[in-house]
Image (spheres, rainbow, N blue to C red):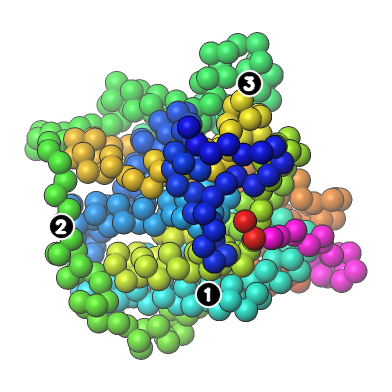
Amino acid sequence: MPIQRQDGEVQPGIKWGPFTLRVPFVHTGFELPEFLQGLLVAAATGLALVPTMTTYFGLTFDEAVLMAIFSSALISSGPILFGEPFAPGWITPVLPLSLGFVLAQDAFPTPVEKFQVMIALSLDLAIILLVLGATGLGKIFVEWLPKALKGAIIMGAAIAAFKRVFVDTAPENLRVMPWSMTLAMGLCLLLAFSVPVQRYKAKWPWLAKLASLGLLPGFVIAGIVGVCVGELSYVDAEGVSIIKWGILNPPFASLFAKVSPFAIGFPVKLMMATDVIALAFVGYIVLFGDIVTGIEVLKGAIPKRPDEKLVFDTTRTHLSTGIRNVLMALFAPFFPTQGSLWTGVHVIIVNRWAEGRKSMDSLYSGISSYYVFGFPFLFFVLPLVTGLKPLMPIALALTLVLTGFACAYVSMAIARNATERGVVLLGGTAIALFSPFVGMAVAFLATFALLGIHNTADDPITESSS
């Protein structure tokens, strides 16, 4: 039985510096719906980069899975070790940009050089985060940001997510898996956001239980339908089963020799390269938008949960995310897998948390359960890991669609009048379709030109240590 929280107080934990450790089952409880989702959906999404790492970066399957284990454990440390009230994830919109930069450059022909670029990007992002966190400039920036500009950044993430699913990857994934992907996305949107479904949940307990499982029902339906109609297969081109049996024997030594800067060298010159610094700043801009999104989603739910006090501390968020990026760069470099928010999952957990203490005792219990309490033991079971291979594209598409929808309604809710809504859409479109710097410039100009300096002020974010 975890330590009980008094009504209106912060969930108990162990303070260390600006951070708070919440030990699973001591300071946080167990939430079965989130745990079941995390076992399958989070695992499949975390493994989505394995084919890229084996094809282009020279890793074996076991080495790639071990990198995914390390990345997932670091992501889980956000709420558990550092006390962040967000469901953390990748800086997803920057992933195609970083892969395009690393894989399309003739200057990085070998796996060692490719990993050195990833090290340089992660360390540059970490420096940006740690400097802005240590100086407090990150907090000032978040507080200064006008409402319309916040909305534009979040809308940009929404449009980019939809573009990634329906335009960038549509010719491949939707063509190969039209039924399974469409059913998965449609069912998840219905259970998470449908107004009629929310009404009927009070009448039909079975529907409430089904909706509480979030991404899992759509994920399971996609797997069943995909196999039945032939969109998913568990045999390769030669008719051999893709499922491996046994337990993963983590190849720590070989992975360290291939990816760690202690073995392949620190890329000092690359860290100072203009293109690398620019891409790292792009990562910060998107991550900054995720921080804003996470706060706004929680602000909408907090009035329904006066029993649990949540504390937003953007300085803490900058520092913790910076530390995670440093550790990722040193032992399993793959930019940009250490971000601050997995929007779709964050919204699903927060929505159930908002239903009351009987539904979810603490937000941290829900988040910790979803991330399997920081122990991705499923990754060590080879039949399950290899069995999830065909479902990896579906898991990523689900998270992107839910992220897009959630970001869209949050961004439009931020706007206070018709002009602000126009600025949100214009700025968001520019951020999604142009380069991040050009998009942000358009959003800034639209905000101040159309709203004026005196109409852009926002209320500061109330923060304190927790």
Q: Is residue 70 visible to the viewer in this orientation of the structure? A: yes
x 53%, y 19%: residue: 209
Above or below, 80 relative to 180: below
> Which of the two discs, 3 and 1, sits closer to the camera?
1
| Residue span colored magenta | 447-464
x 67%, y 69%: residue: 139
Q: Circle 3 sits in a helix, a strand or a loop, which is it?
A: helix
Number of numbered discs present?
A: 3
Residue type highlighted by circle 3:
Val
x 79%, y 51%: residue: 415
x 69%, y 66%: residue: 142
Q: CA separation, marks 2 and 1?
A: 31 Å
State which quarter of the image contains the C terminus.
bottom right
Residue bearing the label numbered 3: 197
Residue bearing the label numbered 1: 130
Q: Residues within 10 Å of mark 2 (few under 14, many from 20)?
A: some
Residue bearing the label numbered 2: 251
75 or 157: which is nearer to us?
75
N-terminal-most mark, 2 or 1: 1
Residue type highlighted by circle 1:
Leu
Question: Is residue 163 found inside the magenta-colored segment of the image?
Answer: no
Q: CA separation, marks 2 and 3?
A: 47 Å
Give the quarter of the image for residue 464.
bottom right
Q: Name the spot of residue 14 as percent of width and height, x first.
A: 52, 54
Q: Tell me whether the residue at label 2 lies in contact with that at label 1, contact meaning CB atoms closer than 8 angstroms.
A: no
N-terminal-most mark, 3 or 1: 1
